[in-house]
Image (tube, grey):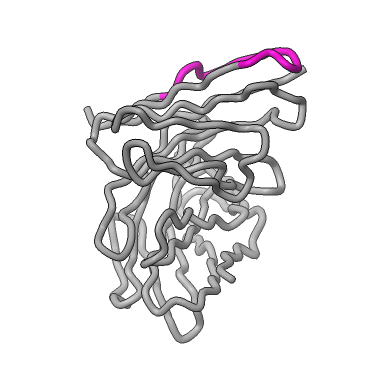
Amino acid sequence: EAQVTQNPRYLITVTGKKLTVTCSQNMNHEYMSWYRQDPGLGLRQIYYSMNVEVTDKGDVPEGYKVSRKEKRNFPLILESPSPNQTSLYFCASSPILQGGFYEQYFGPGTRLTVT
Amino acid sequence: AQKVTQAQTEISVVEKEDVTLDCVYETRDTTYYLFWYKQPPSGELVFLIRRNSFDEQNEISGRYSWNFQKSTSSFNFTITASQVVDSAVYFCALSEAGQAGTALIFGKGTTLSVSS
């Protein structure tokens, strides 16, 4: 089954404790992205990757890191989480169309709480 | 700058009513893509439709239909004969072509509640 998976689905952690949220897709998509969803602010892009070893900042990259060592995986790293990073996180992937993008397929979401 | 506006924050209807969710977008690109996503109470984001800027043909899929009008920069979504299972948050989104890494720009979403 074609899908984007994220782990963990739920995480409660404390300020400053490094964590990684994994994301994996089995559709051989070039493009992968991380979003966060917050009440009243909607979904905002954190980082994206156009292909292996190619990553770039989205709208709200502060406090996050990513890597793309393999095409299928795109982990999100919070080196020193803070309470303002409490949010619902989505990973997404998409093939790249010449001059544009196809629809992005989203993972199930990771609900992160930082206390 | 690109922007997506969903003016309706919440809509409540009774089952079998028709309901239209409005979406107005702003972009300076001549080539762009519009999307609708559904987020049910379980939280996942489900892709519903993609529309290219050069294709203004309306689309119908079962009880769902979409009306794309470039003249008014709108991409409205209608659910015919709504059902309780249609209760969800619906997001309209925009992607501009030709810009590497362009994110999906989401509207704030419309929460649809369908009661029986």
In the image, is residue A89 above or below residue B26?
above
Is residue A7 within the magenta segment?
Answer: yes
Q: Residue at x 77, y 17 (%)?
A: A115
Q: Nearer the viewer, residue A89 or B70?
A: A89
Q: Residue at x 59, y 16 (%)?
A: A19
Q: Is residue B52 left or right of residue B73?
A: left
Q: Residue at x 58, y 57 (%)?
A: B107
In the image, is residue A30 above or below residue B57?
above
Q: Which residues are magenta?
A: A6-18
The x, y position of residue B70, in whole percent, is: 43, 81
Numbered disc total? 0
The x, y position of residue A40, in whole percent, is: 71, 48
Q: Is residue A45 left or right of residue B49?
A: right
In the image, is residue B83 above or below residue A21?
below
Which image quadrant for residue A26? top left
Q: Nearer the viewer, residue B56 or A12?
A: A12
Q: Residue at x 54, y 55 (%)?
A: B106
Image quadrant where one finds the N terminus of chain A: top left
Answer yes or no: is residue A70 visible. yes
Is residue A23 within the magenta segment?
Answer: no
Answer yes or no: is residue B81 visible. no
